[in-house]
Structures are given as structure tokens and as C-alpha cells.
Image: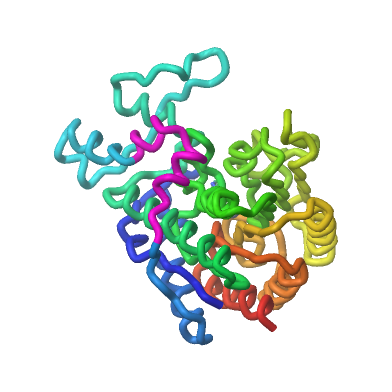
Amino acid sequence: MLAFHNPLHRGHAPVHEFFRGERVPCFENPTRADYVESSLRARGHRLLAPDADSSTVLGQVHAARYLAFLEGAWQQWLALDTANASVQPFPSVWPVRTLRSDREPDNFIARLGLYSMDNGTPLAAGTWAAAKAGADAAASAAFRVDAGERAVFCCTRPPGHHAGPDFMGGYCFLNNAAVAAQALRDRGADRVAVLDVDYHHGNGTQSIFYGRGDVLFVSIHGDPRTEYPFYLGHADETGEGEGEGCNLNLPLPAGTTATAWFAALEQACARIARFGADALVVSLGLDTFEGDPISRFALACADFSRLGARLAGLKLPTVLVLEGGYATAELGTNAGNVLDGFEQ
Ligand code: SP5
Ligand code: ZN
């Protein structure tokens, strides 16, 4: 399968994140992409550098002021103190509910909170460049599929599906799957389906398309009553306005094994077939793997081949975008199994 990699991903290499009050090493780190790239090369897949500029599409799925903030954030952080070059900024205050989010505060950390949903998404010197190159890879993949390629994989990090119209979160900054879906719409696909199989609900993608009837969002994920991102992803979220009926959440309890997971996948595929999509975008999180250190489903390596085969069975032009997956040593096997299962 043709794949686009992200030549700048390594510039996004924050060191720590917070977990239960402690600083722990980042789960979302550059070795993830290294494992996937080397597995794909070993299996004979072609890896190309992005050849499209996603700027226009980014402006359709993210707010202009959020994009401007993200692009300049590291420079603003350094401007506070040059010693900040070796420190990661974290937000410490957020405009929840009755607080105002229509004004950008002058304080950098307060702006960071305005544009964040959590304190689990550290910024590093190369974050903007890495995220932008990832969005370029997603747009490149969509354009190839529009030009007739059966399926294209976007092998990138940081991931994207938690990033909403105007916020980062869950290790995500720019929503690569939304970029791919919007790029396909712009190139003439009347209806696009996004299927999110990451362990965590794709709250960002859902929010970006919630009011739209031209993009169906379907997600299989850990039940938000107990799993991140907690505040979205319930079964009663069905879309609004023109998007009513075009959002399907299939939450499953922590501990779900392959039989129940693949039953949910059948429901998801049936909804996508009924929607009559012209193209498919898959948010390919691999953190449903039984060995994932931060997730609680139990798919085995071989199940990812079965997933790939089922996705191919939808018989749609398909962009697959890498999302989560933190069992790094097995990440290449699992991504490769999806691609090979798709092409079998
Ligand atoms: C793209 C993606 O998969 N983002 C996931 C973001 C999850 N953020 C919350 C991390 C919570 C870490 N919990 C650690 C449990 C260790 N036993
Ligand atoms: Zn995830």
C-alpha cells in the first residue's frame, strides 16, 4: 500500500506528561513512528514524503485563531524566558462552562489553557512543524485516493483525532483525519465516512463534523464513563442540525475482547454502507491491542489483519491515518497487519 510518512515527526519530542500527579515519560514518542516505518519497509510498502500543502484544508476544519496560536506557541513560550527552551509548557487553568472563551488572554499559560482540553498534551520546539507536516501527509493521502489510488496510509505522529475545531488534547494538535475527510470533500466526494477505531473516542473529529450531513462519523471506543476523553463519546450523541443522524458512537466497556469488538465493527460497517459514502477515512488507532499500556481492550496481533480485511470489504476509496497505539514494539506488526489484511 502506498504510504506517506512524516519527515518532521521527530521534532515533536516532549519528555514528560502528567499521570496522577507524577511526571512520567511520554507514551506518545518518536519511536512509535520508527517502528511503523521499519515494519512497512520490511513488508514492501512504499513510503513517500508529503507532496501537498494542507493550509487551505486546515482553515476549513480548525479556527484561524487556534492555528495562529499553535504556529507561534513555542516562540511565545521562549519569549517569556530563554531558559524555557528545556522546559515544556503545561496549561494550569481552563475556561470551563461559565467562564469566557471569546477573548484571548495576554498571559501565555492562560492562552494555552484556552486552546487545550487537558494537561496531557505537552508542546515541544518542533510541535507545530511536525503537526503541520502530518496534516500535509493526510492531505497528500486524500489527493492520491481522489486520483484513483485504492487506499493510502498516512504514517504520522503526533496523532490528531482528539484535536477539535479550536483546541489540542490527548496528544493531538491538528486533526489529520478531518483534514483527509475535508480534502476528499473538496476534491468532489459528495459524502465521506470517518470510521474511528482508536481505543479513545475521537472527540475532536466528532466535534468538527457534528453539524454536517456530508461527513458521517462512526466511532468504536472505550466507554467514556470510565475512559478518556470522558466528556464525549456516549451513544446518545447522534449529530445536530443538518448532521442529525450522521454521528454514531459505539462505546464498549473496558476489558472488551475481539468477539464483541468485531460485532461493533459490523454495526459500524453497516451504518457506513447505508450512508452511501463515496470515500472512507479510517482513524487507525492501534491502542485496542491487548498489550497497550494505557488502554483496556484485548485485540491480538492477528485481529489487526482481520480488521484490515473488513475495512477493504467496504469497497471504498480509503485513507487510513495512524492515531494512538503505545505498545511501541508491537506497533509495526499491528499496523503492517492492517495494511496487509486490507490488501490480501
Ligand atoms: C491519540 C490517543 O490515543 N490519545 C490518548 C490520550 C490519552 N490521554 C490520557 C492518558 C492517561 C494515561 N493513563 C495511564 C494509565 C497507566 N496505567
Ligand atoms: Zn487512543
Left or right: residue 12 versus residue 37 is left
Which region shows up in magenta?
52-70
Q: Can see residue 307?
A: yes
Q: Is residue 62 magenta?
A: yes
For this rendering, which residue is in front, 176 or 173? Answer: 176
Residue 242 drawn at (x, y percent): 73, 32
Can you name the residue that lies furthest to the left here? 82
Residue at 20% across / 38% down in the picture? 78
The part of the image, by quadrant, that contains residue 75 is top left
For this rendering, which residue is in front, 207 or 184? Answer: 184
Residue at 66% across / 44% down in the picture? 227
In this picture, is 253 found above or below 329? Answer: above
What's the magenta bit mostly, secondary-structure-wise? Answer: helix
Left or right: residue 93 versus residue 86 is right
The part of the image, by quadrant, that contains residue 91 is top left
For this rendering, which residue is in front, 241 or 171? Answer: 241
Quarter holding the N terminus?
A: bottom right
Q: Can see residue 21?
A: no
Residue 251 drawn at (x, y percent): 76, 47
Residue 274 drawn at (x, y percent): 84, 53
Residue at 63% across / 39% down in the picture? 209
Residue 332 drawn at (x, y percent): 53, 75
Q: Is residue 39 magenta?
A: no
